[in-house]
Image: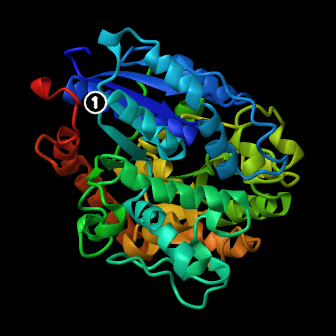
Amino acid sequence: MSSQPHAAILCSPGLGHLIPTFELAKRLVTHRNFTVTIFAIPSPTSKIESELLKAAATPKFFDIIELPPPDISGCVGPDAAIVTLLTVMMREARPAFRSAILGMEYSLRPTVLIVDLFSIESLSIGDELGIPKYVYVACTAWFVALTVYVPVFDKEVEGEYVDQTEPLRIPGCKPVQPEDVVDPMLDRIDQQYLEYVRIGTNFPKSDGILMNTWEDLEHKTIDALRDEGLLGRVAKVPVYPIGPLTRQVQSAGSTSTGIRDKGLFNWLDKQPCESVIFVSLGSGGTVSLEQMTEMAWGLELSQQRFIWVVRPPARSADAAFFTSGNQDDDPSTYLPKGFLTRTHDVGLVVPLWVSQVDILSHPSIGGFWSHCGWNSSLESITNGVPMMVWPLYAEQRMNATMLTEELGVAVRSKVLPSKKVVGREEIKEMVRKIMVDKDGQAIRGRVKGLKLSAAKAWSVGGSSYNALSQISCGNERKC
């Protein structure tokens, strides 16, 4: 094998999976002198994802090998949930991944294998090669704790999790409220639940878990994952908090995102400091037409400046996951009549997509109305921007609870948006709370403190910097 450490990273489809994988790869290259090859299965219908894969080639930090999407039509039904689709897809892709690895010249084969959450069954390929193997979970330590503990809950909890009258207690961690459980736990009969339990069962087969978080952000949960007398006896493997791993801001002249061509930044540059709320519910985030109408009226009634990235109402988040960025609808066809005209002087409506990190880093941004996917949450925190959280699917309900109740850097609606349409008056009050009200100043102060904590974690000698240095390179002479 090569004398230089070489990491092979297997990544499942989805922008939320690709982006943190790219950032991990860059850190391995710049901080550990690794060479990296990313094996990716792009979403067959996502235009943005395809463009991101192409853009990642310049400047070239790592190699990307696109594996052909396997045909899973005979393995899943037409209404299969996203977790089922991803886990089955990555399971069926194992032969192609194995062939691609073994097809490399022996001297160029990887010395370390890293797989993402949905590719966990490919850890066996690391055993076959006799190299260290890790699972990279681009989420919170709290989510990792729930996932490694779900096989225990599977045996001990009777009935549906959402019907429990008591919180789900994970040793050493903040309990999970029944209404906050991740999507695969909503229905124990559905295949995605069985897949999720299997994922939790397979964690101990790795040599360690990499997490996109840092010590100071979740020290209690991280300690529990390490404690052999508590949660650590279930996890059984070391954990490495190596976050926050987030996208870097594009240069001012960048044309890769197209945002400057739309005049968006010319408008932002003219707005007062921290006066604009940025509204974006993620690449797969969709709401009903009724909820979109209330969102529009809430923004208008708040009388705050805004940038709103809008997508046409869709049937479900699962339906939007593999089609993000493909629609080309006119927002005037689904936003309230006259909304674009009435708000012309105070807000911008942008169809489909913008480079989020470029927006959040702008000094005029004072708040982020977000679906609170973990990538988005980290981008908001690392730019010191308070959040208005709007969880839609996956683990976002847990993220929203953590951001509001534990970290105190966000506000949320009284009832989950996934359960009930949130009205315009409540939306107006939430927007004003983080943008202009006195209560919002404390939230703003806390998120700016976390911004400093995040930077410290990745400074030389910081906790995440050190954690990454502890990961085996699979070639001890060069580590």
Q: Quadrant of the C terminus?
A: top left
> Could you tell me residue 360's position as x and y percent?
46, 44
Q: Quadrant of the N terminus?
A: top left
* Residue at 35% in and 78% down: 171
Q: Above or below — where is 33 with respect to 395? A: above
* Residue at 89% in and 44% down: 333
The residue closer to the viewer here, 469 or 8, is: 8
Q: Is residue 472 left or right of residue 204?
A: left
> Could you tell me residue 467's position as x and y percent?
20, 46
Q: Disc 1 marks which residue?
A: 28
* Residue at 58% in and 23% down: 96
> Could you tell me residue 79's position as x and y percent?
83, 51
Q: Residue furthest bottom?
A: 165
The residue closer to the viewer here, 394 or 367, is: 394
Q: Is residue 310 left or right of residue 475?
A: right
Q: Is residue 247 left or right of residue 26?
A: right
Q: Is residue 393 left or right of residue 17?
A: right
Q: Above or below — where is 248 with respect to 412? A: above
* Residue at 73% in and 67% down: 189
Q: Is residue 283 visible?
A: no
Label 1 sits on what residue type? Leu
The number of callouts visible is 1
**Label 1 residue SS:** helix
